[in-house]
Amino acid sequence: MNLSLATLLQLCVLLPIFATLGIVALRRHQNLREAVSIGTSVLVFYAVVSIYLGLQGGATIDVNWLQILPGLSLSFSVEPLGMIFSLIASFLWFVTIVYAIGYMRGHNEDHQTRFYCCFAIAIGSVMGVAFADNLFTLFIFYEILTLSTYPLVTHAGTEAAKKGGRVYLGILLTTSIGFFLFAILGTWVIAGTLDFTQGGVFPAGANTAVLGFILVLFIFGIGKAAIMPFHRWLPAAMVAPTPVSALLHAVAVVKAGVFTVMKVCVLIFGIDLLSVLPTTQSLLYLAGATVLLASVIAMRQDNLKARLAYSTVGQLGYITIGALLASSMGVVGGSMHIAMHAFGKITLFFCAGAILVAVHKSKVSQLDGLGRRMPITMTAFFIASLGIIGIPPAGGTWSKWYLLMGTMDTQQWIILVILLISSLLNIAYLLPISMRAFLFKDPTSNAAVGIKEAPLPCLIAIGITTVGCIALFIYPQPLYELASSILQTSSIAHGQ
Amino acid sequence: MLAHLPILQVIVPLMAAPACLILRRPQLVWMFTLLASALAFIISILLLQQVMQTGTISYELGGWSPPWGIEYRIDKLNAFIALIISGVSTVVLLAAQTSIEKEIPQDKHTLFYILYLLSLTGMLGIVTTGDAFNVFVFLEISSLSAYSLIALGRDRRALWASFQYLIMGTIGATFILIGIGLMYQMTGTLNMADLATRLPEVAETRTVTTAYVFFIVGVCLKLALFPLHLWLPNAYAHAPSIVTAFFAATSTKVAAYLLIRFTFSIFGVSFSFTTLPMETLFLGLGLLGIFVASTVAIYQDNIKHVFAYSSVAQIGYMIVGFSMSTNAGLSAMLLHVFNHALMKGALFLALGAVLYRVGSTQLRDFQGLGRQMPLTMPAIVLAGLSLIGVPLTVGFVSKWYLVVAAIEKGWWPVAGLVLLASLLAVVYVWRIVETAYFKAPVVGKELVQEAPMTFLIPVWILVSANVYFGIDTRISVDIATAAAQSLFGVVP
């Protein structure tokens, strides 16, 4: 292929958005319509991989679309963190589409055309977030992501869906317009630029009290990172169909949040400045409290998806902690956890959806003995649980390892203890699910029932992501290299 | 011909108005009115181009040189406002014939167009003239035609709304006249440029202060600045849809223009903001207006009322920008004047389409409209997003400039409040979205069709403008900042 890298990058953002036209045009032909979705996702993944390979060769990419306000333009570039995010999102988009086809048909959902359209726009905006060259561009795609996922969350159209959608939109818009935009504007006035810059953008003599205030606005404003008390939207969004919960609320939306937090901490403040701001420490404790509280709440949820949602809130806290630790180890651990958690959590959601489609169960307490009926699904669930907890043979081991190293580096002993306790809590809310499935007997039917797995596309998707969890344990090297080049990057990132 | 553009701007619609009487046939009258308005639009584009290139144009009416004769004076500020007025007027008129078919009895159609043209004349006259008394004359032309236009509304509540507006508007006009009279008494001149040079000599007197206060209070009544906004919601809700779309986008803008013109170019910043505590007053009223009106908007059941109260809130945003008395603040205000015209024009015109098909704009009648009117409802959603200030729409550009201006002035809390207030807009816009898209139509109610093309085209022109000027901001931002700069640089 002789497309330039810059063209490929623009295609990543534009292809999914143009794909909606095809999806709408083919709305009467189910199979063709889904073929458009799958085809686009393959192309986007191919484009992202090509960009990745190009970057390995030392190329830099800068794309300028148009200047919206003087000094503020829609422009894109590639740096390692965005690379990690875009690789994961585009790959998992493909897997999720495969899964969604099985799920949506198996579940006889309505409005499937609207569903696939919004899905595509959401992924296009995730690519925009991942490749944004400045906070302004990032913010625009961040908002498009919120708005395009709203119809997905409220897909069912029921009263509960409407209520969930209201909380979803309410919290995400409140935080993003009330705090995030405010912080961006503050940054703009103080620093005079919004470009992501290695080492931060703020001038040396800036008032640290004001900057500390701006940091607080950023952390609360990026509501997608679900730091308490602005985490309520995540459980509320669980009314969505499972593929949506899987991709958007384990990968795209929440990861767009923590990705933004990471970018702001590293490339707007810079970790040197971050470590001396007066508010960093308290925010770190807040993130720690989020991790602990979310884990405790997760233990008390009987609804499987709600339990997974609170587990996500907790795991996002890990990544925020990684960013706020302001040390290279923390950044490496946090960025790696973006990938590790994505694979683990999407597998868990896929399994939850598969259980719902196959045996119509959604509560943890109903899962006794399910391991016999759905052996593949529950094995995948078990492996993914290990990934979230952070024990071999799943990838989560490495990211948590580096996060712990980061806390020791910066001598954040309290955070260290919090992370350790939280890992125990993770065990307490995830492993019992597998134990019930495999060790307990189903009380309702003691007769031997046959195997009843979810539709084949669902199983394929589950298989791919589970293999991904294990592969990331065995070959974490490429991911580690990307993550560790976030900080010492000049060869690979930003072309200035 | 080109030299006479300033007066043609006013004369074309003024002469077109009585000509309508000759044409008689409604269809013809409509096309003629549209033509006149389009001509005015073209003239304003030409004028703006000329002003941006060569600077202020002074036109001597009848060849009498100012300050004795009447002068028409076009600078960047009023060319910009005239462009907004004539542009929105033309787009809105595209839908007029279809809309009034159902709202106004057949025999009053010609009358409607005549009044519309007179109202347009009045507004264009106010902005183009360089003579203070002329301002009053045109103000009365536009107001009197406005009262009658509102009274043409579908039911008898329109009469009451019109009467309310008549009383309030007359008080406002009287105050403005008293203000102008006192200025004349102190300086012996009515020419604006002349006033600007002579007022500083007598600025210390109590009479001048009184003149300013009378004038500003009068203007604020016409502007519907909180708490002088009481006439606005009913007038907007009960007037014919076309009138509401036209007025919501333009009439308060004219008052905003007068406020800027008299404060910045005639009395001067130092008088208005240093001698008098205008900063605190306007900032307080602006913020109060934003919060109170937005909150009230949330609890309205008639969607026309919702957006009418939202208009009062948006005026609050403009006034907050005004109160900063900085270049950036004024630019933000002017940008919002332009952007708000696009949003509200689109919204009220789309509501007109709903009224045309459904026969009501009550919230409960929106149930299921998302399916039944698949082109009108997205227009309302997009314009609503613009009202909220979502990126890639004009509303975002306004908000960006306003908040940056506030932070530059060191008003951090104001910046935060302005952003928080946009969330109130989320609530009232989303009530409509939820009702239209998530509630099934009331059982037993007839399903309606999509609105006719004559509605959809102008609505989508305005909606596209909302998005276009949200992405390509060069035109609007350049003109607004240039106008603001010229106000801080030289006297007109």
Image (spheres, rainbow, N blue to C red):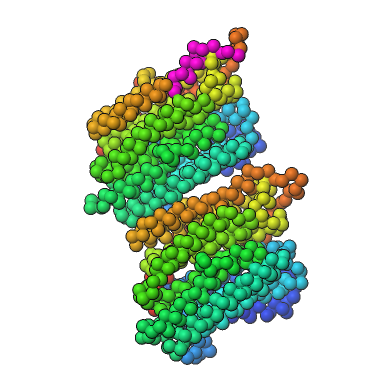
Q: Does the image show residue A4?
A: no
Residue A32 falls in which quadrant of the image?
Answer: top right
> How many numbered marks does the figure carry?
0
- Relative horizontal placement of residue B247, taking residue B261 as reference (left or right): right
Q: Which residues are magenta?
A: A429-444
Q: Residue at x 37, y 83 (%)?
A: B203
Where residue A268 sits: x, y (%)?
31, 46
Where residue B271 sits: x, y (%)?
37, 77
Q: Is residue A179 above or below residue A53?
A: below
Q: Nearer the viewer, residue A250 or B468?
A: A250
Assign the N terminus of chain B to one quadrant of the image.
bottom right
Assign the C terminus of chain B to one quadrant of the image.
bottom left
Q: Is residue A122 above or below residue B476?
A: above
Q: Does the image show residue B234?
A: yes
* Furthest residue in direction top, as rendered: A447
Q: Nearer the viewer, residue B256 or B418?
A: B418
Residue B414 falls in which quadrant of the image?
Answer: bottom left
Question: Is B11 inside the magenta-drawn segment?
Answer: no
- Relative horizontal placement of residue B114, taking residue A194 as reference (left or right): right
Q: Is residue B200 above or below residue B30?
A: below
Where residue A276 sits: x, y (%)?
24, 43
Q: Residue at x 46, y 64 (%)?
A: B286
State whether the magenta stretch is mostly helix, strand or loop: helix
Question: Is A440 inside the magenta-drawn segment?
Answer: yes
Q: Residue at x 45, y 53 (%)?
A: B420
Q: Is residue B421 above or below residue A338?
A: below
Where residue A356 sits: x, y (%)?
57, 24
Q: Residue at x 45, y 61 (%)?
A: B287
